[in-house]
Image: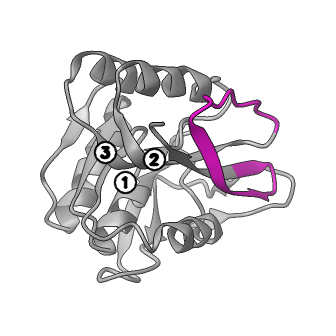
Amino acid sequence: MLKYKKNNLFKIKKKKIGKIKIIGGKWKNRKLFITNNYILRPSISLIKKILFNWLNPYIQNSKCIDCFAGSGSLGLEALSRNAKSVFFLENNINIFKQLKKNLNLFNYYNNVIYIDVFKWLNFKKMKYFNIIFLDPPFGKNLINKIIFLLEKKKYLSNKTLIYIETEKKNIINFPNNWYIKKKKTVGNISIYLCLYLNI
């Protein structure tokens, strides 16, 4: 269970395993599990609801990547709403083991990779993704670093959508060809939906 406190980050009750729900699509109300790990900070239902309302016109048959997969909540939410595929990347071994268990519950076994996202993006040659989820651990200044790498390695095609979840105080250096379609702040968290235009 997740508890939201105003003006604080989201806290996980002190137990080994918690549960969160899929909030929409064919798997609505099905549960997945989260480990009690201080690094893990799953998106709460309110934020997921806002995000997937934004993504609703674009999610069908999309190719997605969840760069900091954690529990798999965002990627599974996309698959529940008929995304074509999702790459799940996670570099914490304990979180990764639980991620695989969660995906197994939904009979999804493809593209689940235990690796540092920066290493993967540097060396893996993929054409592009339609939707990219960027929800890294807070306090590590990872957003600007990964934006630079996505640009450098050309993982963005025309009209790729990029979701960003970060601390409200974080200053993001958006490239000139990234356009902010949507933005909202919930407590100390800011969320963005950006559009990449190759012009």
Q: Is residue 136 above or below residue 102?
A: above
Query: At which x and y percent is residue 105?
Result: 21, 66
Identify which residue is drawn at 27% across, 42% down.
Answer: 97
Identify which residue is drawn at 38% across, 31% down.
Answer: 92
Q: Does dot 3 land on a helix, a strand or a loop?
A: strand
Q: What is the C-alpha distance between the residues marked 1 and 2?
A: 11 Å
Q: What is the C-alpha distance between the residues marked 3 and 2?
A: 10 Å
How many labels, in total?
3
Task: Write down the residue under mark 3.
Answer: 129
- The answer to whether marks 1 and 3 mark residues whose Cβ atoms lie closer than 8 Å is no
Task: Write down the residue under mark 2.
Answer: 133
Residue 9 shows in this picture:
no
Q: Is residue 137 above or below residue 84?
A: above
Query: At which x and y percent is residue 24?
Result: 43, 80
Q: Nearer the viewer, residue 24 or 196?
A: 196
Q: Is residue 78 above or below residue 152?
A: below
Q: Indicate the amino acid at tag 1.
A: Gly
Residues in magenta?
169-190
